[in-house]
């Protein structure tokens, strides 16, 4: 799913567009015991309750695509009769009305989800009447192209509210507030099937993790049967390692800056094209980028092995995870220089008195610890410094 498709589904989570038919859930203790379960028609809820549930499920469609939101494909074996995808397909087909399937789903979550606190498993089912679109992407509200049937899952921590004083109007005093068990925003969630090309895709799911560095691999592996990609942080580490191992002693400031500029150019092209799809780097793309940045044919001899060891044979790295769109940074043990990502030309290297130095031209507007200074070097204004 791309940004536009995620946004389209997210917009359904409002009272105005509400076509959701059923909600179900299971409250689980930290000891992995079911405390209670429920299943009911969504339309019978009070409007305020609907708002709270919509807020929770909107969260599972929020974050950065490729970091918090991850498109996952089901392996072929998961679509066999006893496979994970086949089970989710049966659950979706039941429209959350089969109590045995719901109970089996809760058991699978409890078995695969690890946490040290109480949590709530929530499921929400919807039949979305997908409107047609004109060639210029304008929705035709009176012309439905298909019905997209799907469910969302959210797994939310349940915590005791913080102790506090509250006002008791009847007694006109402030008293210790009774602590309640409160449902927090979800840690993880997913949607099945995926909404690819604005239609149901039972071969994919959209997965959400609040913490982009903890994707809960047990859950993705056991419950979904999908192989999760490297986390955002690990993708960045893999990228850096591949560059360092490939370039070796030729890993110069100039080459790395050229690589940064090439990545920024790709990001800008995607932005200018208003592409809803995240930009990813596969092995071929990364090879071309390194060669364009100045890597020699000798350097590239180790590239294939390094990429496969760090990113996987068919691995891809999300551009947003490996290249900052906010800064270009040069770091030493004692000094860090941060530059606007599109002004890397301001930083250059130069040999001064036999030492390698970073040289940065100074403009008229310079501040030191928030204080505007007129010049940095005594005598730079033509007068002798004292």
Image (tube, helix red, strand yellow):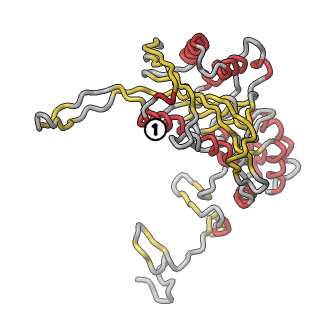
x then y, percent, for residue 54: 50, 37
Q: Does residue 231 appear anywhere in the picture?
A: yes
User: On screen, 274 above or below 44?
Assistant: below
- Residue 200 horizontal/vertical position (percent): 73, 33
User: Which residue is most to the front?
Assistant: 142
Q: Residue at x 73, y 48 (%)?
A: 279
| Residue 356 sits above or below residue 235 on the image | below
Q: Is residue 260 above or below residue 88?
A: below
Q: Which residue position holds label 1? A: 51
Image point (68%, 43%), residue name: 5
Out of 110 and 199, give the one closest to the viewer: 199
Q: Could you classify mark 1 by the number of other residues whose Cα lies within 10 Å: few (under 14), some (14-19), or many (20 or more)? A: some
Picture layout, residue 173 above or below residue 248: above
| Percent position of residue 349, x then y | 67, 65
Foreground residue among 333 and 88: 88
Residue 233 in view here: no
Q: Which quadrant would the N terminus be assigned to in this image?
A: top right
Q: Residue at x 59, y 17 (%)?
A: 97
In the image, 120: left or right of 144? left
């Amino acid at each position: 799913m791309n940004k536009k498709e995620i946004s389209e589904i997210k917009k359904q989570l409002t009272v105005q567009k509400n076509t959701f038919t059923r909600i179900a859930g299971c409250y689980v203790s930290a000891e992995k015991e079911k405390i209670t379960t429920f299943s009911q028609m969504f339309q019978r809820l009070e409007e305020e309750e609907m708002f709270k549930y919509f807020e929770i499920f909107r969260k599972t469609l929020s974050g950065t695509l490729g970091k918090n939101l991850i498109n996952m494909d089901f392996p072929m074996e998961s679509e066999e009769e006893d496979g994970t995808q086949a089970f989710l397909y049966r659950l979706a087909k039941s429209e959350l009305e089969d109590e045995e399937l719901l109970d089996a789903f809760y058991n699978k979550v409890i078995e695969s989800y690890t946490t040290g606190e109480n949590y709530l498993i929530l499921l929400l089912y919807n039949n979305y009447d997908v409107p047609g679109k004109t060639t210029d992407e304008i929705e035709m509200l009176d012309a439905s192209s298909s019905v997209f049937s799907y469910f969302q899952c959210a797994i939310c921590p349940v915590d005791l509210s913080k102790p506090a004083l509250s006002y008791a109007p009847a007694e006109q005093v402030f008293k210790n507030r009774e602590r309640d068990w409160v449902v927090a925003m979800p840690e993880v969630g997913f949607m099945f099937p995926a909404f690819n090309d604005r239609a149901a895709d039972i071969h994919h799911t959209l997965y959400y993790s609040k913490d982009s560095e903890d994707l809960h691999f047990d859950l993705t592996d056991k419950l979904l049967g999908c192989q999760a990609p490297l986390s955002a942080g690990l993708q960045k580490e893999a990228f850096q390692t591949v560059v360092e191992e490939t370039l070796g002693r030729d890993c110069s400031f100039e080459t790395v800056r050229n690589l940064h500029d090439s990545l920024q150019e790709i990001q800008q092209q995607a932005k200018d094209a208003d592409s809803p799809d995240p930009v990813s780097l596969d092995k071929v793309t990364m090879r071309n980028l390194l060669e364009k940045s100045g890597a020699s044919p000798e350097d590239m001899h180790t590239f294939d092995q390094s990429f496969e060891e760090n990113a996987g044979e068919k691995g891809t790295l999300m551009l947003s995870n490996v290249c900052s769109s906010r800064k270009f940074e040069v770091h030493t043990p004692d000094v860090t220089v941060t530059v606007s990502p599109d002004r890397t030309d301001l930083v250059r290297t130069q040999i001064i008195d036999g030492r390698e130095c970073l040289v940065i031209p100074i403009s008229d507007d310079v501040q030191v610890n928030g204080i505007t200074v007129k010049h940095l070097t005594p005598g730079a204004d033509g007068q002798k410094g004292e």
